């Protein structure tokens, strides 16, 4: 394929071999996509231990795991629970993903927030107490470009000490300016580690590239992100295999990206536009088992729990191993303050149409825990945990 016929995302993905050779991470080990394809990473003693912990077992065994998980969490993290909230910048997307509400196939109301609109969303969250915000966007280089993200970071940095990104995967050279602008965390979920299912779920767009996404955390590490989060979307493939792959990925990152703090999440599919139905169910009991197994095998890794889960389950597992929770979340652009309502437009397979109704942009998925931030914080205190709104300030790096 010549340069003239390259698609936009193919151009963005091209890497200079010489430039990669100069990066501190690449060149010293195989990437995870390479080690996972070889299969050897699933045979490590740690992953084999994890495999035994997620085998079918009695309630008494899960209770013992829960006690051990809780004890390890208190030992390494104390009684703190970091709270964060997402701000959705855009629900525009060029990918066709069967399970996602933002898929270009869905006829939904879309909008991309302007910089000042995002600042008003952030100001709302800051007034609620948040000092840790995750910026989320669909994958559309026309609307969510590197320059757009840079300007967003520069605008929010004086307001918010800790800013993380959950956006389209990039090259290390593209991430580096965002880190310099103030992004300290990068979150990227593989969705499913099962390659065949991945190909089936991602029909068109740059997200079709399985290995490109799988190696994204390592590119982010090379760019200097202080925190890196990974996860699998449970419901697309067999939960046991997804959990094993997730454990193998964590071990790989611990060995090769050891300067960054790692977090892991286990989101389960929720209702969304397109009405995709989960193919495989991860029941609550096994959800708790996997979470405890992750804590036992990875005692220093943060475990993230979102508002996808019901309040009762979140309350039950919060003391067992979770170290970071979202609260009072909205999964649509402008969800907190109504920003962008005057620019709503509807698209069908990427083509704009006249809106057929509705007063807000489509959400990525329906949340399950609709409690306010204050209600979640109060419940955590009742459980003996300490909500933490701020655990980082860039000034630390400048301290003498």
Image (tube, helix red, strand yellow):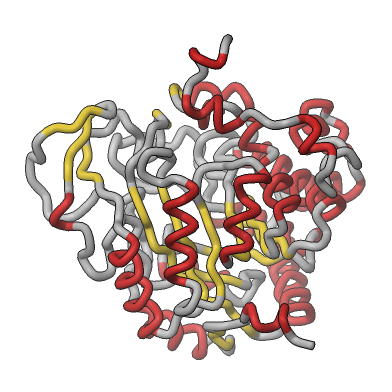
The residue at 43%/40% (across/down) is: 139
Q: Quadrant of the C terminus?
A: bottom right
Residue 62 in view, yes or no:
no
Q: Is residue 240 above or below residue 197?
A: below
**Residue 190 in the image, given as x and y percentages of width and height:** 60, 41
Tally the marks.
0
* Quarter where residue 289 is shown: bottom right
Q: Is residue 89 above or below residue 354?
A: below
Q: Give the camera-side residue of 152 and 123.
A: 152
From the viewer's perspective, is 359 left or right of 149? left
From the viewer's perspective, is 353 left or right of 320? left
Q: Give the camera-side residue of 49 and 158.
A: 158
The residue at 46%/55% (across/down) is: 149
**Residue 203 in the image, given as x and y percentages of width and height:** 44, 22
The residue at 55%/40% (across/down) is: 191
Q: Quadrant of the N terminus?
A: top right
Residue 149 in view, yes or no:
yes
From the viewer's perspective, is 46 left or right of 378? right
**Residue 170 in the image, given as x and y percentages of width and height:** 59, 42
The residue at 16%/57% (across/down) is: 341
Q: Is residue 269 above or below residue 126?
A: above
* Quarter where residue 2 is shown: top right
**Residue 14 in the image, given as x and y percentages of width and height:** 64, 28
Q: Give the camera-side residue of 140 and 193.
A: 140
Q: Is residue 273 above or below residue 367?
A: above
* Quarter where residue 307 is shown: bottom left
């Amino acid at each position: 394929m010549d340069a003239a016929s390259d698609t936009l995302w193919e151009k963005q993905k091209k890497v200079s071999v010489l430039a990669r050779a100069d990066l501190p991470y690449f060149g010293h080990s195989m990437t995870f996509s390479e080690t996972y394809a070889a299969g050897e990473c699933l045979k490590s003693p740690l992953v084999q231990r994890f495999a035994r912990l997620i085998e079918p077992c009695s309630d008494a065994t899960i209770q013992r795991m829960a006690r051990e998980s809780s004890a390890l969490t208190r030992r390494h993290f104390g009684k703190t629970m970091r709270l964060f909230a997402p701000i959705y910048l855009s629900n525009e997307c060029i990918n066709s993903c069967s399970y996602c509400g933002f898929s270009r196939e869905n006829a939904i109301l879309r909008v991309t927030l302007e910089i000042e609109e995002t600042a008003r969303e952030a100001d709302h969250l800051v007034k609620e107490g948040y000092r840790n915000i995750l910026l989320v966007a669909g994958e559309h280089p026309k609307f969510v470009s590197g320059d757009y993200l840079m300007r967003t970071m520069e605008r929010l940095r004086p307001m918010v000490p800790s800013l993380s990104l959950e956006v389209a995967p990039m090259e290390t050279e593209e991430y580096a300016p965002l880190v310099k602008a103030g992004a300290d965390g990068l979150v990227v979920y593989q969705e499913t580690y099962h390659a065949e299912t991945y190909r089936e779920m991602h029909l068109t767009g740059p997200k079709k590239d399985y290995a490109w996404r799988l190696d994204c955390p390592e590119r982010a590490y090379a760019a200097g992100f202080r925190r890196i989060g990974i996860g699998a979307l449970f419901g697309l493939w067999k939960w046991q295999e997804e959990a094993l792959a997730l454990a193998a990925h964590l071990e790989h990152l611990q060995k090769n990206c050891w300067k960054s703090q790692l977090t892991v999440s286990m989101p389960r599919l929720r209702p969304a536009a397109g009405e995709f139905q989960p193919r495989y169910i991860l029941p609550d009991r096994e959800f708790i088992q996997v979470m405890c197994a992750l804590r036992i095998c990875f005692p220093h890794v943060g475990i993230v729990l979102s508002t996808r889960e019901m309040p009762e389950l979140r309350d039950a597992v919060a003391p067992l191993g979770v170290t970071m929770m979202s609260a009072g979340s909205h999964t649509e652009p402008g969800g907190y303050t109504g920003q962008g309502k005057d620019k709503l437009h509807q698209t069908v397979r990427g083509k704009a149409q006249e809106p057929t109704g509705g007063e807000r942009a489509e959400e990525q998925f329906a949340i399950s825990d609709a409690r306010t931030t204050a209600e979640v914080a109060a419940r955590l205190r009742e459980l003996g945990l300490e909500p933490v709104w701020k655990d980082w300030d860039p000034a630390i790096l400048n301290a003498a």
